[in-house]
């Protein structure tokens, strides 16, 4: 045991003597240990670049002598221009942003035999833990990297355009300093006239609406040596991730794209017309803000009279019924800088995809087009005549409303009696049996602003394809009954069947119906004959006691005022 212990002690002493006999040599050059390398390195430091980095400065025993973190600001300097100790000038080239290096510098490449005041002693080896945050070069320009561009790009940003865009603003190391998304509103500004930092003025040029690009700029095209407050340090490169949402120029007018125009267009809209149309309203980036389809109702209004935003007033002129067009409206012809609150942002370009359903003018009357007329066309329908006709009814865009053919029977009315809309009354005038017509009836001669719930929209122009099937001549105006033969001088006596010198309702009714059935008299066609007779009786029963006496009884020819009586 003792021999083994002595042998071990001898080895230890020998090893100590050998180690002591080898002189300790200082570092001959900079030693760089890469402690963190980012996955992406789009650019590395080279001589002449300006860098911003953080560092901890320590001696080999771990004692710290300096730290940029303690000062709360990066160290900013040109590389390779003798603004740094020689060892750091050699250590920084090739570094990437966000790379971390442990740099060991021998004294002759640091502060040498003299050291640095009370901070760095002579012949000191220095260790720097460096984190690179920024690189740029005085020769740099704005760098643009587009990572999404729409297939269609009808227009690109140019100088003096007004744009709306969202952005995330970061430093080159990825530190976020600002974002329009967090404010929930776009950044709205003119481009190329000095309202933006120079790099952004350049970086936005040539963008399309919907395009996304990364704009990287050196500090002399950003906020320069002073930075901007606490968020953007001096001499910082800036990176903006931008998506362009809107673009217009103050000189812009509306843009109209005709998407579908009917082959036949007998009439085009003009100022003062009243129009019904559907639309989808979107912002220039496609964001919807309103739609008439979602309300299941057309938008109804006068055009060219200031009831609409100026751009739409202009965009709806000259259209055909059934036409589809896209109207793009700059904000100064829409809702301007203020927008409409939550749906339309300020300074927004608006896009309306419009389908014109119908239009008319308040001065319009019924349009009559004869599609068939018999060779012998008489008699002609007039006020008071009882007419029977078939019709197909539709809206002006062809939307089906109703048809008598569905019910297998004609529609029967007395002209001038208010039994149909005024436009139909006008359109049926002077027709003969067998004639066919197309009637276009404006709403003020049809169902007006209210329409018929579930059937006819309000303010709708109607189209009727009409065929007159039968007609019975009416009575002279003001008459509900006329005699075909001479009137009996004993009329009252003939009515008074029970000879009680008074005529009861049943006697009166039986007598009139007998005259009609025997062809001696006529009731007005198209009305309920019993109601007519009841009305005639009431006119003769002047004291209202339910009976007619001979003193009360008079023929119409004897009356001084109009009554529906004999």
Image (cartoon, grey):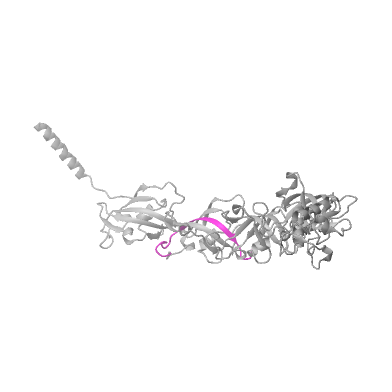
Name of the residue lying farthest toward the left: 2
Residue extent of the magenta highlight = 228-252
Left or right: 424 in relation to 34: right
Q: Quadrant of the C terminus?
A: bottom right
Q: Nearer the viewer, residue 488 or 560?
A: 488
**Would residue 232 be counted in the magenta stretch?**
yes
What residue lies at 78% left-to-right and 57% top-to-bottom?
500
What residue lies at 51% left-to-right and 63% top-to-bottom?
198
Q: Quadrant of the N terminus?
A: top left
| Looking at the image, residue 559 lies above or below residue 277 | below
**Would residue 343 be counted in the magenta stretch?**
no
Q: Nearer the viewer, residue 534 or 417?
A: 534
Left or right: 553 in relation to 164: right
- Is residue 560 visible from the viewing direction of this image? yes
Q: Nearer the viewer, residue 260 or 495?
A: 495
Name of the residue lying farthest toward the front: 500
Residue 41 place in picture, x, y as percent: 44, 49
**Which quarter of the picture shows residue 507?**
bottom right
């Amino acid at each position: 045991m003792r021999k083994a212990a002595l042998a071990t002690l001898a080895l230890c002493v020998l090893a100590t003597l050998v180690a002591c006999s080898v002189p300790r040599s200082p570092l001959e050059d900079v030693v760089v240990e890469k402690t963190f390398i980012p996955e992406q390195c789009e650019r590395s430091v080279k001589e002449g670049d300006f860098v911003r980095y953080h560092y901890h400065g320590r001696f080999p025993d771990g004692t710290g002598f300096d730290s940029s973190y303690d000062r709360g600001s990066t160290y900013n300097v040109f590389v390779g221009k003798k603004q740094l100790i020689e060892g750091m000038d050699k250590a920084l080239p090739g570094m990437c942003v966000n790379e971390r290096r442990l740099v060991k510098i021998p004294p002759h490449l640091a502060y040498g035999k003299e050291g640095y005041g009370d901070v760095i002693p002579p012949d000191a080896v220095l260790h720097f833990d460096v984190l690179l945050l920024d690189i740029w070069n005085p020769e740099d320009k704005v760098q643009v990297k587009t990572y999404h561009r729409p297939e269609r790009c009808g227009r690109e940003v140019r100088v003096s355009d007004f744009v709306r865009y969202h952005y995330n603003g970061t430093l080159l190391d990825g530190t976020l300093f600002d974002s329009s998304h967090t404010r929930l509103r776009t950044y709205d500004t003119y481009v190329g006239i000095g309202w933006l930092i120079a790099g952004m003025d350049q970086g936005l040029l040539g963008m399309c609406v919907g395009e996304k690009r990364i704009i990287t700029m050196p500090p002399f095209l950003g906020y320069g040596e002073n930075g901007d407050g606490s968020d953007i340090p001096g001499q910082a490169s800036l990176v903006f991730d931008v998506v362009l949402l809107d673009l217009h120029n103050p000189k812009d007018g509306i843009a109209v794209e005709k998407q579908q125009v009917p082959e036949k267009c007998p009439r085009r809209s003009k100022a003062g017309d009243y129009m019904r149309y559907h639309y989808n309203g979107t912002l220039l980036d496609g964001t919807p803000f309103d739609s008439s389809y979602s309300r299941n109702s057309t938008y109804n209004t006068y055009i060219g009279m200031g009831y609409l935003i100026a751009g739409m007033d202009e965009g709806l002129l000259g259209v055909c019924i059934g036409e589809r067009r896209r109207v793009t409206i700059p904000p100064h012809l829409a809702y301007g800088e203020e927008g409409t609150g939550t749906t339309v942002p300020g300074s927004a370009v608006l896009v309306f995809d419009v389908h014109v359903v119908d239009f008319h003018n308040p001065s319009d009357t019924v349009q009559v087009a004869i599609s068939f007329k018999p060779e012998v066309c008489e008699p002609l329908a007039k006020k008071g005549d009882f007419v029977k006709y078939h019709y197909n009814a539709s809206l002006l865009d062809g939307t089906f409303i109703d048809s008598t053919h569905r019910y297998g029977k004609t529609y029967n009315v007395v002209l001038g009696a208010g039994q149909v809309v005024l436009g139909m009354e006008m359109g049926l005038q002077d027709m003969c049996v067998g004639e066919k017509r197309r009637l276009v009836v404006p709403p003020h001669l049809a169902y007006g602003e209210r329409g018929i719930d579930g059937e006819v929209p309000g303010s709708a122009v109607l189209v009727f394809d009409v065929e007159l099937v039968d007609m019975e001549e009416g009575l002279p105006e003001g008459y509900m009954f006329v005699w075909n033969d001479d009137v009996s001088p004993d009329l009252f006596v003939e009515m008074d069947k029970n000879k009680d010198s008074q005529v009861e309702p049943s006697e009166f009714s039986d007598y009139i119906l007998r005259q009609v059935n025997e062809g001696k008299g006529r009731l007005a066609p198209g009305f309920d004959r019993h109601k007519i007779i009841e009305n005639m009786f009431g006119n003769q029963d002047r004291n209202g006691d339910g009976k007619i006496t001979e003193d009360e009884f008079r023929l119409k020819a004897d009356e001084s005022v109009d009554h529906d009586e004999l």
